[in-house]
Amino acid sequence: MPEREDNHYDILIAGGGFAGSLTALILHNQGFKVCLVEKGQHPRFAIGESSTPIADMQLRDIAVKYNLPWLFDFSRYGSWQQSHPEIVCGLKRGFSFFKHYPGQNFTTDTDHVNELLVAASVDDIQSDTNWLRADFDAFLVDKVKEAGINYFDLTEIIAAKRETQWEFKCTRHDEPLTIHSAFLIDATGSGVLIDNLFGVKSSSDSFLTDSFAVFSHFNGIARWTELLKKAGIPTDDFPYDPDNSALHQILDEGWIWMLRFNDQRTSFGFALSGREKSLQGLKTQEIWDAMLKKYPGINQVLEDSVLAPVPGKIIQSGRLQRKVDSCFGTGWAVLPHTAGFVDPLFSSGIAHSLAGMQKLVTILGENFNNPEPLYVDLQQYEDSVFAELKLIDQLVAGCYLTMAHFKLFNAWSMLYFAATIAHEQRLLKKLPAGCFLGADDEYITNMVQEIYTDLLKIIDSPQLSDEDVTQFTNRVRERIKPLNTAGLLDVSLKNMYRHTAAEL
């Protein structure tokens, strides 16, 4: 393809996932000349599928603020199904957790000792969604094209040099292509591009969490509620059907996600501790087989399933945790999912990306041609992204420490739900969004740090007693009290929370 003389832009956005496409659309509507560069081609397989009330609030805000009215319908399951039933998604009523023990089928009691259901919506119509990323990302790219934004797929950025603006040397369909732009936004979701172009490294050294994933998409996975009924386990007092949620099966070594879509596909994956010695050195299929052998209840879930055609194989990640050394430099910045990642446990990825995207487009809209205030704003943006990753890391790390002790897991996880409730209230009251999940809130960050220190003391004790668990739970209950509008850790609710999200 011959080089075009008009390949000059204000902003080049690298990465055509949902965040890159929405960033392009917003900046275009703000009057910037932008292009979107995608190394691959849509539709493409991707995970990171589970939305949340915070993400949905942000979608509605973006739709109104940036004149993208069609986006509003994707913020609730009901309106999504009414407006775009052809774009596959799943119903997500909340977060569900079921604790499994090695060598045993799943068991519980009338107090739901091995169960935790946290509703995030009052009904199916108002519900969150699981996004089939291949469909939704491709739809957004079509919107980019409709807007007249130049879109380059199958295009790889291989070099960059800067004088007054960037000159990016690319290959597209194996032909050379040069693109000029004043600014680069990296929305690739990986630190590879800024390492290749600018020598900015990524590291996992600062993280408390150490996990990796083994995952795929499947057809024909058994419904968990049907397996519970076959085992004679009552589900009558569940606040919703857990198959219509982000369904977590908690193991000693980690956890499993099960995210259903409404076309019979299910995203299923193990997120496992990288410190688990019994899994180290095993190949992907060996890990998969070992976990199914160890947990017969999970084997039942999968025994009649088959791999979906896409991706058609089981994939193993490296260590999930990573963070770039810098979020910005002269003429470039990264979105949060490129800046770093912790773990998918609390489905924070979509909401975190949307929050950072809104901050970044505001910064560029206000100071694009003013280098000094732009630098100050981008430094504050970097500080907030790193603070957010630190908070998410601590919340997730505490969960991995407690997965073998479900009562402790239950208590510790309430810190996340309390922080989420507080952040939802902040958004609903139209207060400044601040940092994601209150990472700039001294009460929240001190609370998490202090209780994490308490947790380490009892986890490291030679014998974990019932009294230790009770005291820890009481401590969490007391500390979350100023934020707790949902009855979290109310013994009478028996781990069944009917609606914890803000009124939306």
Image (cartoon, rainbow, N blue to C red):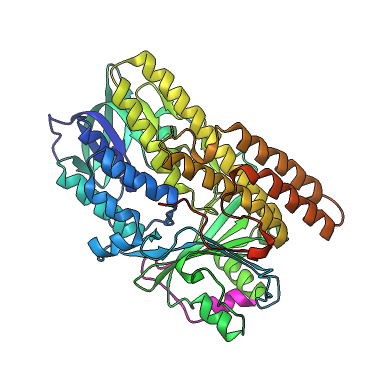
Q: Which residues are magenta?
A: 296-314
At 57% from the left and 33% from the top, the residue drawn is 441
* Horizontal relation, residue 18 to residue 83: left or right: right
* Horizontal relation, residue 319 to residue 67: left or right: right
367 up-or-down from 359: above or below: above
Q: Residue furthest right?
A: 462
217 up-or-down from 357: above or below: below
Nearest to the observer: residue 14 or residue 477: 477
Instruction: From the top left corner, tell me how far across and down residue 222 is, in percent.
Output: 49, 78
* Horizontal relation, residue 386 to residue 15: left or right: right
Answer with the quarter of the image where residue 443 lies: top right
Nearest to the observer: residue 242 or residue 378: 242
- Magenta span includes 402: no
* Horizontal relation, residue 503 to residue 207: left or right: left
At 56% from the left and 83% from the top, the residue drawn is 229
- Magenta span includes 306: yes
